[in-house]
Image (spheres, rainbow, N blue to C red):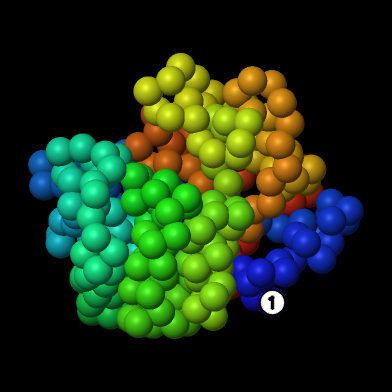
Amino acid sequence: MSWGWPGSYLQKNPTTTSALRVDLNADIGESFGLYQMGNDELLLRSITSGSIACGFHAGDPSVMRTTVRLAARAGVAIGAHPGFPDLVGFGRREINAEPQEIFDFVLYQIGALSAVAKAEGVRLHHVKPHGALYNMSARRKEVAEAIARAVASFDDTLMLVGLPESELIAAGSRLGLRVAREAFADRSYEPDGTLTPRHLADSVLSEPGRAAERAVRIVRDRKVVARDGSSIPIQADTLCIHGDTPDAAGLAAAVKLGLEQAGITVTGLTQ
């Protein structure tokens, strides 16, 4: 059953805990040359989908190929993780690019990873923007439209991943793309539902128990506790663990175990 569309499985089954299911994703393939980022091979044991860096904010052709192979071997669905052309800032600095520029470099990155995937005998499943590009697409319609148009023009069967109630999800829906709403098990939230800026204290949850507890509450209760202690509503089709979070593999394993112990099935968005 496909449940990444608007009107998802979770919406249709709000009170049946035993029937709840969610995708668990991570950003992977973010090493570059001699510089290693995270432990993708270990992380892939716990996740059901992975978003692979495409060479602009992280990754390179060899890392992309290796990561695609590792994901395919682990049975993990892969997607493109395009970001701003900013290796020095890891794609987390906002760039004032025109919508056409954003369309072009998103299309370029999807095409690059798709070529690698095709050579390895697998296909792309989704697209999820990275870092500053992701955050800008949540609030700026013109950025969201540029990304969604690039995805639709390349392959309109690809799923577009973004924050719930964001401009990116709205843009993807308008263009007829499948969309998946994403929440974060390893990040702190602000009262308005946005992610806590990384320069603030406790913006990243590095303790496995806290991440697992947050994940279960998001899926089961559709709520997340914000940094000020308030409870905010949230709906998610997929949960993310950042690949560069300290001990991301341990966090992902704890989150998966916590979800399963709560009776929540961890399964890919294509299930």
Residue type marked 1: Met
Q: Residue furthest left?
A: 34
Q: Residue under label 1, please give it.
A: 1
Quadrant assignment, res 19:
bottom right
201 is higher (above) or lower (below) than 175: above
Q: Residue at x 57, y 32 (%)?
A: 189
Disc 1 crowd, CA 10 A, few/some/many (<14, 14-19, 20+): few
Asked whether residue 252 appears in the rendered view, the answer is no
Q: Say above or below: 164 vs 160.
A: above
Q: Which quadrant holds residue 82?
A: bottom left
Task: Classify mark 1: helix, strand or loop.
Answer: loop
Return the residue nearer the eye: 77 or 85: 85
Q: Is residue 269 above or below residue 164?
A: below
Residue 111 appears left or right of 10: left
Residue 217: percent from the left, percent from the top? Answer: 73, 38
Residue 101 seen in this snapshot: yes
